[in-house]
């Protein structure tokens, strides 16, 4: 039975589950569903009405509207629906049940707001995580490019260093050769003079 004296959130959710109402707080609770949640007899009559309607629809489909079983099922559905509607009127007139149903509806609306906010926070967190993941990927690519550029720069420096050393050596050899030639030329000129 679903007689809720203390309207705790857990009690509300368990009560909704016991009468087959949606547990998702984001779904709006109609006034009829709220009344069914606080009045077990109304919930039972609603279930009987829904079952009778399903039986009637099945018989119409399988046997046709004029079949005697279908006519009896139609009468049973009308009777169950009338009982449900009569009890609904009684429940709506009962101040205590009406205030409990309103409190339940307000609590579920508050739960829906909390759930909606939580979904927004989760969505924001996912977006932040995606941004940071992309940023880490971009920084990794920049780091790899910098490492490649650094390696290229070291290679170029090495090439310039050794090219410079070779050029210096070649120039120093050329300079030494030129000096030797100048000295030899000066010695020859001094010998011939």
Image: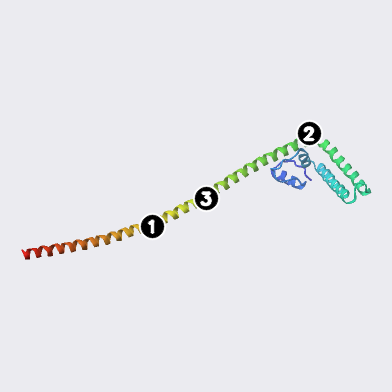
Residue of label 2? 95
The label nearer to you, 2 versus 1, is 1
For label 1, the residue is: 152
What's the residue at 56%, 46% (across, down)?
127
Does label 2 or label 1 sit earlier along the sequence? 2
- Tell me whether the residue at label 3 lies in contact with that at label 2, contact meaning CB atoms closer than 8 angstroms: no
Question: How far apart are the alpha carbons under marks 3 and 1?
Answer: 27 Å
Q: Residue at x 58, y 44 (%)?
A: 124
Label 1 residue SS: helix
Residue reaching furthest to the front: 192
Q: Tell which tag, 3 or 2, sits nearer the viewer.
A: 3
Question: Is disc 3 placed on a helix, strand or loop?
Answer: helix
Residue designated by label 3: 134
Does 50 sit above or below residue 183?
Answer: above
| Mark toward the start of the polypeptide (3 vs 2) | 2
Q: Position of residue 51 (x, y in %)?
A: 84, 47
Q: In the drawing, does residue 45 fall left or right of residue 145? A: right
Could you give the CA–CA distance between mark 2 and mark 1, rounded to whole angstroms?
85 Å
User: What color scheme is it?
Assistant: rainbow
Near-viewer residue (56 or 99): 56
Q: Earlier in the sequence, mark 3 or mark 1?
A: 3
Marks 3 and 2, how far apart at CA:
58 Å
Image quarter where the C terminus lies is bottom left
- Expressed as whole percent of the image width and height from the top left, the position of residue 88 reads 82, 38
Q: Secondary structure at mark 2?
A: helix
């Amino acid at each position: 039975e679903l007689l809720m004296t203390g309207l705790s959130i857990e009690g509300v959710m368990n009560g909704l589950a016991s009468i087959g109402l949606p547990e998702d707080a984001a779904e709006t609770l109609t006034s009829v569903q709220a009344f069914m949640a606080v009045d077990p007899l109304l919930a039972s009559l609603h279930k009987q009405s829904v079952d009778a309607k399903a039986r009637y629809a099945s018989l119409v489909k399988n046997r046709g509207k004029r079949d005697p079983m279908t006519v009896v099922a139609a009468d049973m559905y009308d009777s169950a629906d009338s009982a449900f509607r009569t009890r609904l009127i009684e429940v709506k007139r009962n101040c205590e049940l009406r205030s409990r149903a309103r409190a339940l509806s307000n609590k579920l609306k508050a739960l829906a707001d909390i759930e909606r906010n939580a979904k927004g926070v989760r969505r924001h967190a996912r977006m932040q995580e995606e941004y940071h993941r992309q940023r880490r990927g971009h920084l990794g690519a920049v780091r790899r490019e910098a490492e490649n550029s650094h390696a290229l720069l070291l290679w170029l420096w090495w090439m310039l260093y050794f090219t410079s050393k070779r050029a210096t050596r070649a120039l120093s050899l050329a300079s030494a050769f030129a000096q030797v030639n100048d000295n030899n030329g000066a010695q020859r000129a001094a010998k011939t003079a």
